[in-house]
């Protein structure tokens, strides 16, 4: 009798593991786009710190990301079980927050350039610390900002994964969400660490005896600052695309309008498939920029009103 019970238990475990493997693959495919945005955003978030502080900053943000997911996974399971109607409003708020942060970053960047007349930093490690600010305090702010952004993107990853496993047993949901949370975090911050240290690898290779190694090292040294600048641009654009996409997905009229626009774009001769693929992302980006601008206006007006009332 005990042997039969053990075999039944092992069979149940095998079934759960099989389901988890299948669901994890499906969830990984569905969250791949968000993973790309997460990578671009976080690589961009750690730019501007001193070269010797890059890896400690990446590690600090990675620890924050693990903590985010330690909060999000149980919260998602509880919300799914007891208040599934909360998922969409929370995602909408997160999407609006991403748009707000993206537009605030653009606005402050424009204001700094206008005030100083300076161009962007000329190399990957040139200090971006605002005048008069303590570098350690600046680093703390960068880490906090990166962890806040990670929280929103992690919430979307968890929500997408939850949607994939929603109809499966509770244990399958728990294990799948946990696997995706861990794998995504290690994947993103492992790649971010590699990207921010590209120039150091290039410098190391440029001192080797091999001419091929030296040539590749010189290429990496030249490419690193350009890649970081590109990631900064892509990361900001990703804020608007991800945030705008969350918002439009939650607004039925906007979602249907974007789908209709993609269908029309797909009907264009020769380049139709490409336009159909790009149109939703571009429209989500535009929607995200507008939403971010409106959010910043509202927040600025509220701050002024609170300042006046304080006086």
Image (cartoon, helix red, strand yellow):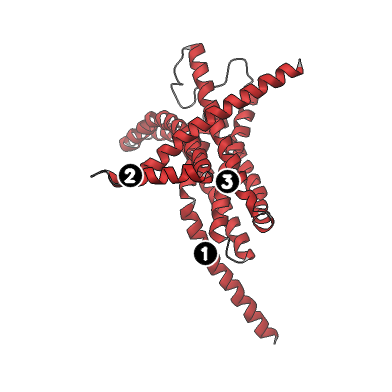
Name the residue that disc number 1 marks. 21
> Residue 154's mark?
3
**Residue 236 percent coordinates (x, y):** 48, 32
Q: Secondary structure at mark 1?
A: helix
Q: Nearer the viewer, residue 152 or 285?
A: 285
Q: In the rendered structure, which disc, 1 or 2, sits on the residue that comes first in sequence?
A: 1
Q: Residue at x 52, y 64 (%)?
A: 21
Residue ID for mark 2? 264
Question: Is 27 left or right of 169, judged from the image as shown?
Answer: left
Cα–Cα gap, marks 3 and 1: 20 Å
Percent across and percent down for residue 136 are 64, 25
Q: Quadrant of the N terminus?
A: bottom right
Farthest residue toward the bottom? 1
Tell which of 173 and 194 is nearer to you.
173
Whether residues under marks 3 and 1 lie with C-beta atoms below 8 angstroms apart, the answer is no
- For the residues bearing labels 1 and 2, Cβ distance under 8 angstroms: no
Q: Which residue is located at x 37 percent, y 41 percent?
A: 279
Q: What is the crowding at mark 2: few (fewer than 14 residues within 10 Å), some, or many (at least 20)? A: some
Q: Quadrant of residue 283?
A: top left
């Amino acid at each position: 009798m005990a042997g039969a019970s053990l075999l039944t238990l092992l069979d149940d475990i095998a079934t759960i593991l099989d389901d988890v493997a299948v669901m994890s693959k499906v969830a990984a495919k569905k969250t791949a786009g968000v993973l790309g945005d997460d990578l671009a955003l976080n690589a961009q978030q750690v730019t501007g710190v001193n070269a010797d502080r890059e890896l400690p900053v990446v590690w600090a943000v990675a620890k924050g990301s693990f903590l985010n997911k330690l909060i999000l996974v149980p919260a998602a399971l509880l919300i799914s079980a007891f208040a599934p109607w909360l998922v969409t409003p929370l995602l909408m708020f997160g999407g609006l927050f991403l748009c707000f942060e993206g537009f605030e970053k653009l606005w402050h960047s424009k204001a700094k350039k206008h005030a100083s007349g300076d161009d962007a930093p000329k190399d990957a490690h040139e200090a971006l610390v605002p005048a008069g600010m303590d570098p350690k305090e600046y680093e703390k702010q960068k880490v906090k900002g990166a962890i806040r952004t990670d929280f929103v993107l992690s919430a979307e990853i968890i929500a997408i994964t939850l949607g994939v496993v929603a109809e499966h047993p509770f244990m399958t949901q728990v294990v799948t969400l946990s696997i995706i949370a861990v794998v995504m975090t290690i994947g993103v911050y492992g790649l971010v660490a590699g990207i921010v240290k590209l120039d150091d690898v290039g410098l190391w290779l440029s001192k080797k005896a091999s001419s091929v190694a030296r040539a590749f090292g010189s290429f990496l040294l030249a490419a690193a600052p350009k890649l970081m600048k590109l990631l900064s641009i892509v990361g900001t654009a990703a804020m608007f695309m991800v945030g705008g996409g969350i918002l439009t997905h939650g607004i039925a009229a906007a979602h249907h309008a974007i789908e209709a626009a993609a269908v029309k774009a797909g009907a264009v001769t020769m380049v139709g498939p490409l336009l159909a693929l790009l149109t939703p992302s571009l429209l989500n980006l535009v929607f995200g920029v507008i939403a971010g601008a409106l959010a910043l206006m509202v927040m600025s007006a509220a701050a002024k009103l609170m300042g006046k009332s304080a006086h």
